Image (tube, rainbow, N blue to C red):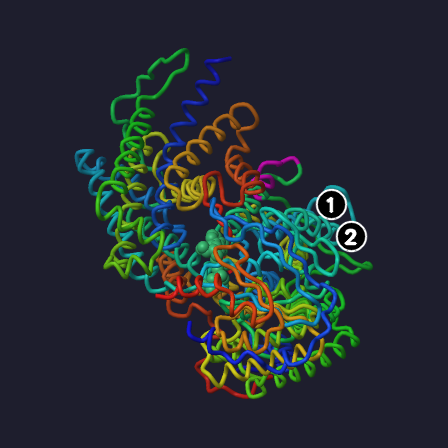
């Protein structure tokens, strides 16, 4: 289990194996669709976990970046006729720049002040998307063209499943690499003690900005692809609740654990689907589960499970 | 010109008074427990829904408000006791998620009990607008502002004059020291939740005739309250009140003169601008962190 | 404070006349106030390269504040700090680290979210490739240097006597070990000037002696050390010079013998003693 938390290769192989065999167990496109949505959420959460779990900085506005990516693709492809890949990259660059510009001042803030600032940014983005209906279609959202590249069109759940699966493996690989590097240690040091990191030469502000930008770009790319997959995007994908959902996935799965973020995203994507059996009680059960897991497993699912199992050799 | 400005100011102060109450609620709980209670908006919702539905079924208004207030306080204490106190040493994010979980839970319960549709509550003293220097004002606005003013003064007195109030303040300054001089800090946390819940619920009841009541009414009101509290400097009571009024008035002016579609964005633009230059809000403590 | 009078004042370092090195740190009219109270007031002194220079003074004298000012953690209200001849007043700590200054903390500042070894590896930060793209794509050169850093960190841990904690989580280590871990982490950055804030506080006699040895060994490699310590036996034994502070101001300065004999110092300590 420790390997699951810390091991690079074992973890990646396990993830790859699960992604490879999963479709055999999914009876129809409905389930495939849920798996794809879980995959998109997982991509965002792996990035967000770099910020929250490793660097210890809160963001309650990451859905805003997801939304900008999604709408960049929707608008640039649909309205201006750009090639989708170019729109995706442009969205990512715009989000990266925006994140860079806001990061420096807001990441000086601590704790709840940072929560407030990121929440504000996310809400402003979603209000803009809701209001500028000339481009975005307003509250009802907009249709998005399919993703075409080199003459191929990505179409149908079966194709998208593999696209998202490969993307997720790639993102997890990048995240594991980053964490196991001098920069990754600097990020964790920022979480552990900013002043101690500084006196051994870590420019803490720089690394906070960098990780904020990286996590925002991950969200943007996921947003762009999601827009093409879903074919319809609404401002709700960028709003406060989506941001909260993302943070919850990270914390639920286990902060400072890349695979924890994946597990959290998958479980909390499935949960509402599973809870539909509760019908009118759905929200009550969801809220109850959130409270209970956080109260009884404040470290999150994966680290708590790992601690229960006998400690094995560290990877 | 002037009448228009005055009109905006008046409606801004009305909604600002509600933000101020919510912000004060955030601050009180933050002081006692260093938790940001994202369920604060649900207290407002409970107050609004309870008074609207109870009066509709024949309960006299004051009693309805009292029941709503008591219900919210009970809920607040339960949230504090079974969620927040148990997770005392959890990280900031974890605590945020717990209170958000609580708010989802409470909205779920409210939907079950009251349904999803809008509930109407009659204005407390009619709907004949009062003319004032060319602006007109709903009598209910006076109720809102007046009630908020009374509550805010009462809270001020409570913290400065009563033992419980002083105990809460002491706990916020230094939890350990408070514990050592015999303050039951757990009770202080419960009391702060109860108090904040009462503020929210009464606010919800007086504003219900203006906004209507529905189970999601607390979401934006709660977030604006959080904005108010941060704007004033977390844990700074008078700051939260000022923050609420500033947000309310700015929002009304923004909606009137700039764009009503961006009304909800105003609060967040202000808070970002302020935090840029004053990372501890307008009145927050500015000490150097000790190492 | 009997110790001041009875300590043996002829330690090995004092027995022969030392060549005094050039100044590595100069503090000029430094002051810092907190809410109107001066924690450091108009303080000037010089530290010579190669010295073990101790700062002593009763609780609240301003020793830690002085460290915070010198290392850029706090900004001075007035005065200057010169490091290696350059004015570094108010410079960010990470920049000072790059110039060769590092420190430990009186109240532990450990990365409790990492292993002990990783704590020390963070100390290698300045000597490693910390850019984003090589990290994301795991450039072979980065991996190789990282492995070297790991070996080096392990060696440093052994040097301070922490070999048995190499794979331990920092959060699981005892207090005395964490004190040493901070020293190893600071050393990993290869400082010219190392500031140690009460490295022996809370340690037993044996552990104190071990820290004493570590400090001497480090000093022998040419690192200048500024030491804040309440253990007078240690201070008198290993210091080349001592600056005594009281209420943020200079009380006395000189060799251990001179400072120990200074009437003001004795009075300040006696006055502060219960
Ligand atoms: N961040 C701060 N904010 C406010 N006051 C401070 C701060 N840091 C230090 N002080 C005050 O400055 C004075 C000097 O404190 P300092 O910690 O430097 O003393 P010290 O000599 O290190 O004492 P000790 O031997 O107990 O460690 C004290 O009165 C302390 O209360
Ligand atoms: Mg000190």
Query: Can I make out residue A173 in this image?
Result: no
- Res. A86 mark: 2
Q: Position of residue A154 (x, y in %)?
A: 72, 60
Do the residues under discs 2 and 1 have CB atoms within 8 angstroms? yes
| Mark number, residue A7 | none
Q: CA distance from mark 2 to mark 1?
A: 9 Å
Q: Quadrant of residue A37?
A: bottom right
- Looking at the image, residue A148 sits to the left or right of residue A95; the answer is right
The kind of secondary structure the magenta stretch mainly shows is: helix
Does label 2 or label 1 sit earlier along the sequence? 1
User: Is residue B168 covered in magenta?
Assistant: no
Q: Which residues are magenta?
A: A126-134
- Residue A15 placement (x, y as % from top left): 61, 76
Q: Residue at x 60, y 51 (%)?
A: C30
Helix, strand or loop at mark 1: helix
Quadrant containing the C terminus of chain A is bottom right
Which chain is disc 1 placed on? Answer: A
Residue position marked by numbered label 1 in the rendering: A76
């Amino acid at each position: 289990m420790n390997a699951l938390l810390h091991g690079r290769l074992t973890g990646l192989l396990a993830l790859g194996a699960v992604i490879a065999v999963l479709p055999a167990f999914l009876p129809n496109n409905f389930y495939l669709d849920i798996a794809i949505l879980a995959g998109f959420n997982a991509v965002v959460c792996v990035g967000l976990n770099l910020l929250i779990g490793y660097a210890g900085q809160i963001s309650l506005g990451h859905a805003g970046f997801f939304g900008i990516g999604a709408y960049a693709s929707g608008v640039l492809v649909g309205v201006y006729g750009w090639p989708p890949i170019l729109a995706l990259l442009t969205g990512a660059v715009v989000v990266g720049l925006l994140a860079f510009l806001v990061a420096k001042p807001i990441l000086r803030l601590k704790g709840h002040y940072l929560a407030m600032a990121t929440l504000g940014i996310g809400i402003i983005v979603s209000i803009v998307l809701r209001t500028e209906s000339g481009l975005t279609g307003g509250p009802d959202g907009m249709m998005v063209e399919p993703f075409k590249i080199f003459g191929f069109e990505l179409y149908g759940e079966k194709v998208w499943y593999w696209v998202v699966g490969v993307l997720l493996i790639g993102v997890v690989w990048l995240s594991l690499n980053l964490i196991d590097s001098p920069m990754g240690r600097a990020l964790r040091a920022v979480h552990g003690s900013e002043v101690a990191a500084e006196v051994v030469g870590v420019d803490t502000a720089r690394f906070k900005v960098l990780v904020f930008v990286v996590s925002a770009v991950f969200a943007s790319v996921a947003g762009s692809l999601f827009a093409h997959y879903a074919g319809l995007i609404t401002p709700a994908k960028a709003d406060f609740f989506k941001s909260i959902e993302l943070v919850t996935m990270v914390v639920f799965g286990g902060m400072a654990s890349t695979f924890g973020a994946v597990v959290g995203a998958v479980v909390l994507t499935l949960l509402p689907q599973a809870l539909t059996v509760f019908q009118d009680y759905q929200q009550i059960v969801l809220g109850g589960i959130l409270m209970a897991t956080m109260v009884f497993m404040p470290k999150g699912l994966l680290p708590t499970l790992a601690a229960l199992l006998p400690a094995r050799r560290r990877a | 010109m002037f009448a228009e400005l005055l009109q905006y100011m008046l409606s801004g102060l009305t909604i600002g008074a509600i933000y101020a109450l919510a912000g004060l609620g955030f601050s009180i709980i933050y002081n006692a427990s260093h938790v940001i209670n994202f369920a604060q908006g649900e207290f407002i919702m409970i107050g609004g829904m309870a008074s609207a539905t109870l009066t509709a079924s024949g309960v006299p208004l004051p009693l309805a408000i009292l029941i709503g207030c008591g219900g919210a306080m009970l809920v607040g204490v339960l949230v504090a006791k079974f969620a927040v106190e148990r997770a005392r040493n959890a990280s900031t994010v974890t605590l945020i998620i717990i209170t958000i979980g609580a708010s989802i839970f409470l909205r779920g319960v409210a939907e079950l009990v009251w349904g999803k549709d809008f509930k109407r509550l009659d204005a407390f003293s009619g709907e004949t607008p009062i003319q004032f220097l060319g602006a007109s004002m709903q009598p209910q606005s006076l109720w809102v502002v007046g009630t908020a003013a009374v509550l805010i003064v009462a809270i001020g007195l409570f913290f400065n004059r009563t033992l419980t109030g002083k105990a809460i303040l002491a706990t916020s300054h230094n939890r350990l020291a408070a514990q050592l001089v015999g303050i039951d800090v757990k009770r202080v946390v419960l009391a702060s939740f109860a108090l904040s819940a009462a503020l929210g619920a009464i606010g919800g009841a007086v504003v219900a005739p203006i906004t209507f009541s529905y189970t999601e009414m607390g979401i934006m009101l709660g977030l604006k309250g959080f904005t108010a509290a941060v704007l004033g400097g977390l844990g700074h009571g008078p700051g939260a009140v000022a923050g609420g009024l500033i947000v309310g008035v700015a929002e009304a002016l923004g909606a009137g003169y700039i764009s009503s579609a961006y009304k909800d964005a105003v609060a967040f633009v202000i808070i970002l601008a302020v935090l840029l230059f004053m990372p501890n809000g307008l009145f927050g403590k500015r000490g150097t962190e000790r190492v | 404070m009997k110790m001041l009078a009875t300590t043996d004042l002829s330690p090995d370092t004092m027995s022969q006349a030392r060549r005094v090195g050039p100044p590595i740190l100069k503090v000029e009219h430094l002051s810092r106030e907190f809410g109107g109270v001066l924690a450091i007031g108009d303080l000037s002194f010089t530290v010579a390269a190669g010295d073990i220079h101790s700062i002593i003074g009763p609780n609240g004298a301003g020793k830690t504040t002085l460290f915070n000012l010198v290392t850029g953690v706090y900004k001075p209200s007035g005065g200057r700090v010169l490091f290696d001849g350059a004015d570094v007043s108010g410079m960010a700590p990470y920049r000072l680290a790059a110039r060769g200054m590092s420190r430990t903390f009186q109240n532990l500042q450990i990365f409790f979210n990492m292993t002990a070894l990783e704590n020390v590896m963070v100390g290698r930060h300045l000597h490693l490739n910390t850019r984003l793209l090589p990290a994301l794509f795991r450039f072979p050169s980065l991996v190789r240097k990282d492995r070297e850093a790991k070996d080096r960190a392990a060696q440093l841990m052994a040097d301070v006597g922490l070999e048995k904690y190499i794979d331990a989580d920092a959060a699981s280590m005892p207090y005395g070990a964490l004190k040493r871990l901070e020293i190893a982490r600071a050393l990993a950055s290869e400082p010219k000037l190392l500031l140690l804030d009460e490295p022996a506080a809370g340690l037993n006699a044996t552990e104190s002696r071990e820290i004493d040895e570590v400090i001497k060994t480090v000093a022998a490699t040419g690192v200048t050390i500024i030491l804040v310590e309440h253990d007078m036996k240690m201070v008198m034994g290993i210091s080349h010079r001592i600056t005594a502070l009281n209420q943020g101001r200079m009380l006395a300065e000189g060799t251990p013998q001179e400072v120990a004999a200074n009437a003001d110092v004795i009075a300040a300590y006696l006055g502060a003693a219960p």
